[in-house]
Amino acid sequence: MPGTTLVWLRHDLRLADNPALVAAGRRGGPVVPVVVWAPEEEGDWAPGGASRWWLHRSLAALAADLEARGSRLVLRRGPTLAALRELAAETGAEAVLWNRRYEPAAIARDAAVKEALRADGLVAGSANAALLVEPWTIATRAGAPFQVFTPFWKAVLAAGAPPEPEPAPATLPRPDAWPVSLPLDALALDPTIDWDAGLRATWTPGEAGAHVRLARVLDGILDGYRARRDRPDVDGTTRLSPHLHHGEIGPRQVWHAVADAVAAGASASSAEKLLAELGWREFSYHLLYHVPRTPLEPLRERFAAFPWADDPAGLVAWQRGRTGYPIVDAGMRQLWQTGWLHNRVRMIVASFLVKDLLLPWQEGARWFWDTLVDADLAANTQGWQWTAGCGADAAPYFRVFNPVLQGRKFDPDGAYVRRYVPELAGLDASRIHAPWEAPAADLRAAGVELGATYPGRVVDHGEARTRALAALAEVSEPG
Ligand code: FAD
């Protein structure tokens, strides 16, 4: 009888398309799925509050799915190596298998775990569940990592379709006796104060929830994706990001589902655009892997000398959605209430923090890290550096988003602002994105008193833009 295999699960909280689980099944012996909670091993980036909220529910869903297949989820606390060693000793395991992670602290930890387990005489191995292409498998013609998205994505597409995802195992062989598991509540992931009503109303964490959402995408969202993806006032994007981050669904599964939908007549143009967004996710991982200092430091080193402002009050106004710019405030309140933010609005609020308030992008990345249910070190780092103009393939710094024009263009009826900034709901679409320009009578009729019912602007955008461009001149390339 082959020996027991531990499957160490992390950002791969699913049963289908899970190569470590498939490899464990092939070994033939009992399989013990295990999650080790070890936030202190994540370097500067232990999961934030919203991520923990999600993880709690995702683990509950995974445990139930495993039980439905005659298996269980064993929960332990870190340090990871000690926990895995203990479990291996308790179960007599001969192998420990897992799917790879790509964050710098995780890479270092995983390498140390692999070496130590092998030194113990165990089989220890990893596979790819999270990416279409792993960062070391493609390079520019010169053999260097990519720094520009379009050639990167061309190279990924040239490699052909990713492998077909494997189905979930029908059953998982169980050990004679199950090792003890901590109860989920012992990990203290769920908030003790009740701030999560909006998250509960918005999301269904877990593999089944991810597939319900994918089905909705295929049946209604995909066809209009290219036209509607920039509109925060409609349900026009996949909202799969938290499911992808926690690995409740993998990019190979999304890829093949979208390709099948196109074969069945869905819009090829929208599908191409959606797959390219998955491409940005891949590009983020490529950059993080090859330039692991970027979560804290600008990719373009000249930006390290950028003359940031010191403005704690501005930071708090931004965090609370009280900047006086309706589209910015709607975004920051959507983030707080639901743990998620539409991509267009992520760009708008990030630009506002960095360029209008002149506050360091790292402050914004930190806030997103704690409040997003999809907080992802690769995508968050790349998104902030892109907006700040200091990352790979970044928006030029001098392109400063005008929050009024962005609001009018992408929330033309004001429905998004009305939803998250209800104190402005009485203003009509022509006024709602710049209430300070509205005639006094319109404000009165809408019950809006600037500086009282809704904040006055923390900065004047025109002046802030001039200030940002002057600051940029200090770090621009000479000549
Ligand atoms: P869709 O438009 O449906 O896209 C499908 C999938 O592609 C997404 O689920 C996501 O996995 C991936 N994707 C889409 N756009 C990007 C992108 N620009 N970069 C990387 N991957 C992308 N995304 C995160 O997953 N986690 C983050 O922490 C994160 N932080 C960001 C911070 C800033 C400042 C910015 C500008 C963007 C950030 N993004 C982040 C990227 C993007 O905003 C989200 O992935 C997207 O809004 C998620 O919504 P969706 O699933 O409906 O996306």
Image (cartoon, rainbow, N blue to C red):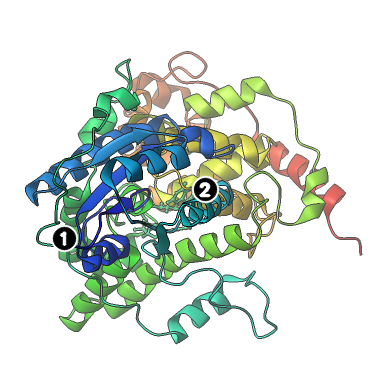
Quick check: which quadrant has ligand 1?
bottom left
Element class at badge 1: helix
Q: Quadrant of the C terminus?
A: bottom right
Residue type at mark 2 is: Leu
Q: Position of residue 134 (x, y in %)?
A: 48, 69
Q: Which residue is mark 1?
A: 215
The mark nearer the N terminus, 1 or 2, is 1
Q: Look at the picture and state if 96 lies above or below 225.
A: above
Identity of the residue drawn at 29% across and 17% down:
194
**Mark-to-mark CA distance, 1 and 2:** 27 Å
Q: Position of residue 228 (x, y in %)?
A: 32, 60
Identity of the residue drawn at 55% across and 78% down:
138
Q: Look at the picture and state if 194 lies above or below 121.
A: above
Residue 268 as seen in the image, left or right of residue 303:
left
Residue 225's disc is none
Residue type at mark 1 is: Ala
Residue 377's disc is 2
> Residue 396 lies in what quarter of the image?
bottom right
Element class at badge 2: helix
Identity of the residue drawn at 54% across and 29% down:
318
Identity of the residue drawn at 42% across and 59% down:
124
Q: Can you tell me whether the CB of the residue at mark 2 lies under 8 Å from the nearest atom of ligand 1?
A: yes
Residue 431 as seen in the image, left or right of residue 457:
left
Q: Residues within 10 Å of mark 1 (few under 14, many from 20)?
A: some
Q: Position of residue 135 (x, y in %)?
A: 54, 68
